Amino acid sequence: MLLAIEQGNTNTLFAVHDGNEWVAQWRTATEPNRTADEYAVWLSQLLVMSGLGLQLDHLDACIISSVVPQSIFNLRNLSRRYLDAEPFIIGENVDLTVAVRTSKPAEVGADRIVNAVGGHIAYNGALIIVDSGTATTLDVVAADGGFEGGAIAPGIHMSVEALHAAAAKLPRVALRNPGRVIGRDTVSAMQSGVFWGYLSLIEGMIARIKAEWDEPMTVIATGGVAALFRDSTSVIDHFDPDLTIRGLLEIYRMNRDQPR
């Protein structure tokens, strides 16, 4: 069984694939200093609680995508020590078979490349992939699967925290659709600015990317915040929460039989 680990700056997803389908998924806060032993205890308990009859030693393969370099040492040790498997690590020891057409390919985040793979195998034609997390990325994938580049903006949570931290009288607010653009009090005004302002950023960037690309494009949204905008815009064609782990599974399948 495959353990796929997708680590962002804020959360880390652990997902188990049995060869046919994803059978379990769990999220935990990203803690760069969490040890392999701590991960193993946490994961063992969740496997038991899943009721699937799984134990840690049932997992015999691992693939890791991380944008937190200091965590990779411990995640690698988790795979080596408890799965008895040398992990596939995006950016280190895997063949992505993806053309990265940027001026500095080595600087492109692992998550963006994995999303490109996951999008290309599921959708036809050129794509815009909107990934809403700690940062919001809008990436262009060509019809042949090549990664063409994109745009990176601060994530919506980061914007909320910055607004609260920088203005003494502004409270911390919950993320939600306030229903109206014109807020009648401070909280609703802040929620409006964050929600509609962020959605306008996404809509505006998609329009500009499409105009620059000048070919039909399909827009895919993924990431923890994507569902917040599901019913509030028509520019997103598909909401796909499994985009990244689909990409990880495809990369694992492309590499598992290669000499290492």
Image (cartoon, grey):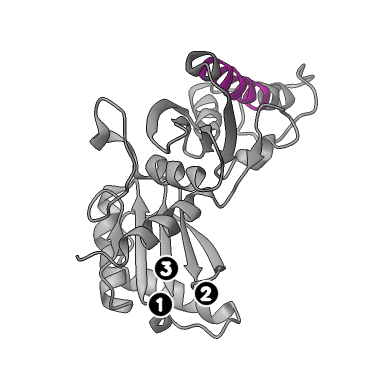
CA separation, marks 3 and 1? 7 Å
| Mark sitting on residue 3 | 3
Instruction: Bin the neighbour count of mark 3 within 10 Å (Cα to Cα): few under 14, some 14-19, many 20 and up.
Output: many
Contact between marks 3 and 1 (CB within 8 A): the answer is yes
Q: Is mark 1 on a helix, strand or loop?
A: loop
Does residue 260 appear left or right of residue 181 in this picture?
A: left
Asked if residue 175 shows in the view, the reply is no
Where does residue 236 sit, x and y in percent of width and height? 65, 32
Contact between marks 1 and 2 (CB within 8 A): the answer is no
Disc on the earlier residue, 1 or 2 = 2
Residue on which the image places disc 1? 59
Q: What stretch is highlighted in magenta?
A: 194-209
The three-letter amino acid code for the residue at tag 2 is Leu
Residue at the limit of the structure toward the left, as seen here? 260
Image quarter hosting the C terminus:
bottom left
The three-letter amino acid code for the residue at tag 3 is Leu
The three-letter amino acid code for the residue at tag 1 is Leu
Residue on which the image places disc 2? 46
CA separation, marks 1 and 2? 13 Å
Nearer to me, 180 or 115: 115
Looking at the image, residue 47 lies above or below residue 133: below
Disc on the earlier residue, 3 or 2 = 3
Q: Residue at x 54, y 43 (%)?
A: 223
Tag in front: 1 or 2:
1
Report which quarter residue 52 is drawn in.
bottom right
Where does residue 243 sit, x and y in percent of width and height? 53, 48
